[in-house]
Image (spheres, helix red, strand yellow):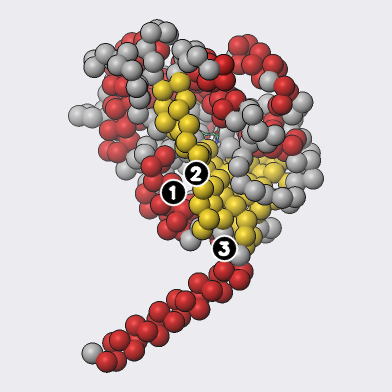
Amino acid sequence: MSDILEVRNNLPRINHLSRGLRKWETVWAVISIQGHPLTTHSYQVVKEGRSWFPSDEQQWESLEAGHLIAIILDSHRKNPLFYAPVENPKHILDIGTGRGSWAVSDTADLFPETIVRGVDLFPPPGDWFPPNCIMEVDDILQEWTWRDPFDLIHLRHMLGSFTPDEWDIVYKHCYDNLKPGSWIEHLEMDPRISCSDNSLPPNAYTPNFSERVLDAAENWNHPLDTVRTMRSGLEKAGFVDIHEKSYRCPIGPWARDATLKEAGRLHYHHWATGMEGWAMFILTKWGLPKPWTKEEVQVLVAKARKELKDPHLHMFQHTRRVWARKPTVEEMSGIHVKQEEDGIALIKREEVR
Ligand SMILES: C[S@@+](CC[C@H](N)C(=O)[O-])C[C@H]1O[C@@H](n2cnc3c(N)ncnc32)[C@H](O)[C@@H]1O
């Protein structure tokens, strides 16, 4: 963790933002007793088998690296946390908040007047949160009971969390619980490994690792191609004014550009600390052609992890941020009138037939 903390401490823009975490010991104790350890990893228990992400120390480290990568890629911006043009937000929600870095350490500090909620299947580590930050343990697929509508809903690195039908439910919940005219923002990475200069041999282990995990996730009906489907998912839910920004995120410090080099250094940590946990649940339960043994997973992880250290291999991941708006009341009444007109036109056409 020391490397990652060092990066956080050296980031001028977010240095002042990090404050710490509030008490969670009671819930955490229950979780630890009930949590079912899978090799060295423990997974959440609100609904067993719901998430493929472990909730253990190693995964928190990986999540923090993932958070800092996103911040670094947009460190030229005054607000590197989101692009949605939200002004004076009162209520923000971070879905699948994980370690809570986006919600707790940064957004709640940047907007001290805003109530920032983070929700996840398991509580974040640590024992102190800023007073305007509320962490909740819940399954986002269940009925939402928050009373106040949100000004911004944020999702990041949620790939594989839901089936395609469940994604429709999540986006619908978001749409229904946002104020008219307010925003949703979603950032995802493509798990496929890219390389644009032929430095990666055809039999490389890391792309093989990704493909095996992608196949297993498909077998589980929790596809990992969210980076490709999130825009159409938002459109389907009724969001308008859709924007997007694409990034290439290097794995390892091989890029010449200083920002990408730093992001790549962290992205190596993101992978090195995360990959066994990502693969262990999914390959031992859903791996093809039959579920893998934990030793098989560990062997592939070890080979890929070694490869990730090679500075001659120029691997990167496509990353996409999409932000979209719920229509305003005026726009919604326009849509309604149009739907009614279309309905009348349809009835008339049917009457003529
Ligand atoms: C890879 S982590 C991402 C964490 C965080 N968004 C970030 O960017 O650092 C995905 C998170 O989604 C959570 N999650 C998955 N399904 C969920 C559900 N149905 N309800 C709430 N959280 C869920 C997992 O528990 C996990 O912490």
The dot on residue 18 is: none
Q: Position of residue 28 (x, y in %)?
A: 62, 30
3 or 2: mark nearer the eye: 2
Specify few, some or many for label 2: CA neighbours under 10 Å numbering under 14, 14-19, or 20 or more.
some
Q: Is 307 on the left or on the right of 31, as rendered?
A: left
Q: Amino acid at mark 2?
A: Glu
Specify few, some or many for label 3: CA neighbours under 10 Å numbering under 14, 14-19, or 20 or more.
many
What quarter of the picture does the N terminus occupy?
Answer: top right
Residue sitting at x 27%, y 92%: 352
Give the vertical position of 173 relative to 341 (above or below): above
Q: Amino acid at mark 1?
A: Arg
Q: Considering depth in this image, is 215 or 45 the residue closer to the camera?
A: 215
Query: Spatial distance from mark 3 to mark 2, Cα to Cα?
Result: 18 Å
Residue sitting at x 61%, y 46%: 84
Instruction: Mark 3 and mark 2 in contact? Answer it, CB < 8 Å.
Output: no
The tag earlier along the polypeptide, 2 or 1, is 1
Q: Secondary structure at mark 2?
A: strand
Residue identifier under label 2 = 244
* Residue 246, visible in the rendered structure: yes
Instruction: Mark 2 and mark 1 in contact? Answer it, CB < 8 Å.
Output: yes
Q: Position of residue 272 (x, y in %)?
A: 46, 15
What quarter of the picture does the C terminus occupy?
Answer: bottom left
The tag earlier along the polypeptide, 1 or 3, is 1
Residue 7, by quadrant, is top right
Q: Is 231 on the left or on the right of 60, as rendered?
A: left
Residue 148, by quadrant, is bottom right
The dot on residue 231 is: 1
* Residue 285, visible in the rendered structure: no
2 or 1: mark nearer the eye: 2
Residue identifier under label 3 = 327
Q: Amino acid at mark 3?
A: Pro
